Amino acid sequence: MAHTDKNIVITPHSGNTTNDPRIAFSGANASVSAQTVTLFVYPTTSGTISIEGAPGQLFSVTNNLKGTIFAVSDISGIPSIEVLDSGVVELAQYNGNVLIGTGVSKGEALHVNGVISANARNPVRFYDTDATHYVAFRSPATVTTNVTWSLPSTDGTSGQVLSTDGAANLSWTTASGGSSITQFVTNVGDGVNTSITVTHSLNKSNVTVTVRENSTNYYVYPDIKFSTNNAIILEFVDAPTSAQYRVIVFGID
């Protein structure tokens, strides 16, 4: 081991039918023996420059805009970065992980230390098991104020929903039971009675009633009297003709 082990060897291989031209670069020092990296020129793919070491191919560039144009391999000679003629950049396609930004990879296929942005309403997609269909999230068409929501630190219980405190902090809460609305619809009028009992059978003490004329769709406002939880009484000035009015009763919890 010596500095004299440093060397550059150029081998044209002119006229050789099996070997291609190469330049071997050897580096060494007082404690490390000669370590050699070789640049090869291959005739494949309209000409390829390949830099190779003991593990295999480390880096290559082709003189052709088809297939793989540029590649960087890992320590075992397997491509870690490939640039294809389609414009696709493949990272860690065969093994390994991708780390963007400073820090240490956590073992995920992609680890990013920094802000991730999806511009112009481009969605973030989550594909199913066989990668044929997905669900996605994207921003609204117009955002006037930047918002970053903070997710809760734990999972909620069954039936809980995400709720905001108005300051972009999300938490799991139990949804309150809102009002339950049911309705009853019927036509009234017989040409005789001005006082008509409508039995709706909603069993509600709180009801809202609308009455409209079937022929014109205009709303009318007779006197309305609460009778029981299941019935109301309509008082008209003149007796409605047969099925003249449509009555809708809304029952509210």
Image (cartoon, grey):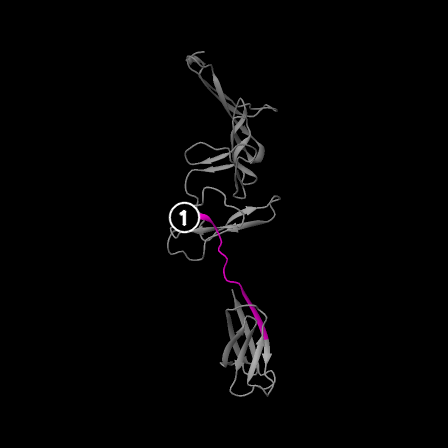
Which residue position holds label 1? 169
Residue occupying the point 41% across, 48% down: 169
**Residue that protrudes farthest toward the front in the picture:** 228
* Residue closer to the observer: 9 or 67: 67
- Number of on-image labels: 1
Residue nearest the observer in this picture, 107 or 94: 107
Magenta run includes residue 179? yes
x then y, percent, for residue 229: 55, 70
* Whole-percent x, y for residue 71 in the image: 52, 34
| In the image, residue 72 above or below residue 184 | above
Q: Amino acid at mark 1?
A: Asn
200, 50: nearer the viewer: 200
- Residue 161: x percent and y percent? 49, 51
The structure residue drawn at horizontal position 50% and vertical position 77%, both measured from the top left corner, is 225
253 above or below 76? below
Q: Nearer the viewer, residue 200 or 188?
A: 200
Label 1: few (<14), some (14–19) or many (≥20) C-alpha neighbours in 10 Å? some
Q: Position of residue 157 (x, y in %)?
A: 52, 46
Left or right position of 179 against 168: right
Judge whether residue 63 can be spotted in this image: no
Which residue corresponds to the image point at 41% horizontal and 43% vertical from the top-left? 115
Left or right? Give the position of 108 relative to 146: right
Q: Quadrant of residue 130?
A: top right
At a point 57% along the width and 35% down the height, the residue shown is 45
Magenta includes 32?
no
- Specify whether residue 22 is in view: yes
Label 1 SS: loop
Q: Quadrant of residue 151?
A: top left
Which region of the structure is painted magenta?
A: 169-185
Q: Quadrant of the N terminus?
A: top left
